[in-house]
Image: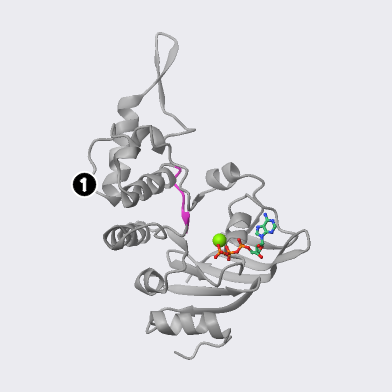
Amino acid sequence: MTTKVEVRGIYKNYGAVEALRGVDVTIREGEIHAICGDNGAGKSTLIKILSGVEIPDQGEFKIDNLPRRFETPTEALTSGLATIHQDLAVASRMAIYQNIFMGAELTRSVMGLRLLDKKRMREASLRYMGQLNKSITDMNTKVEALSGGQRQAVAICRALRWNAQIVILDEPTAALGVRETEQVLELIRSLKAAGKTVILISHSMKDVVATADRVTILRQGKTQLSMETDGLNADRLAHYILSGETVSSH
Ligand SMILES: Nc1ncnc2c1ncn2[C@@H]1O[C@H](COP(=O)(O)OP(=O)(O)OP(=O)(O)O)[C@@H](O)[C@H]1O
Ligand SMILES: [Mg+2]
């Protein structure tokens, strides 16, 4: 099994708050890897470090065995790591295709003028969307007309547009109902089927055991435990988080 992301000994303080105190995580290529842990355990801080929002005080991470340090989110994105934040940051008044190509619009040249190539963006958007959700066919649809799960699909398409090999989702189902949650879990599985490596931050034990191959639990800024989800149920996972046990025995 190939290692995709290797995190070693990451420390991060915010003033006097020790958010991360030596985190180690190994993410394998092509897996869905969940990051769990109580409020304040350091999950979002870890994701911010991987995605170029924060710089660690100590420690390193490697992607494809190369030490990386992203100074900005754009740097992470252009290096193949896309993060879909909880607030999604989609522009609801804009069309699906405009959201997918935001910041990287396709253009064509007409008599020396550079014009937006809407047709090509719509066609490409439809291809990306087709990989995730075949029910949405009109790429001119404004995002405000979409459901929460469909918006999540648009945000994921943006990651596909950048050809991200690693997709990080921070609480993708937190605001969703049962049916929408099921759709988003299906999206996550299709990312894996497309060969992507997925990092899923979630408070939902149910979602984690239903989708993830492995899970890492953070506790008070440290890695408590990493394990396979085979044979693991939601109650057992919650037990590990509550008890702080450092060895898996499920
Ligand atoms: N910008 C910041 N300034 C100061 N302290 C921060 C900042 N960001 C996070 N922290 C602190 O760092 C610790 C880890 O926070 P983090 O957001 O990484 O936790 P989390 O595991 O994502 O929690 P949650 O499940 O509630 O989202 C917490 O004690 C938090 O209060
Ligand atoms: Mg968080």
Q: Which residues are magenta?
A: 162-169
Which residue is drawn at the image coordinates 33% and 62% (left, top)?
185
Q: Position of residue 40 (x, y in %)?
A: 61, 67
Give the number of marks: 1
Which residue is drawn at the image coordinates 63% and 71% (left, top)?
24
**Amino acid on which the number 1 mark rests in the picture:** Ser
Image quadrant assignment for residue 13? bottom right
Image quadrant assignment for residue 208? bottom left
- Going by the picture, which residue comes out furthest to the right? 16
Indicate left or right for 13 with 34 as reference.
Answer: right
- Asked if ligand 2 lies within 8 A of label 1, the reply is no
Indicate left or right for 138 with 89 as reference.
Answer: left
The answer to whether 68 is drawn above or below residue 35 in the figure is above
Q: Position of residue 34 (x, y in %)?
A: 47, 68
- Going by the picture, which residue comes out furthest to the bottom? 249
The answer to whether 110 is drawn above or below residue 95 in the figure is above
Q: Position of residue 201 (x, y in %)?
A: 49, 64
Residue 233 is a magenta residue: no
Task: Check the picture and name the quadrant holding the C terminus.
Answer: bottom left
Q: Which residue is mark 1?
A: 135
Structural crowding at the residue carrying mark 1, measured as other residues with C-alpha within 10 Å and reported as few (<14), some (14–19) or many (≥20): few
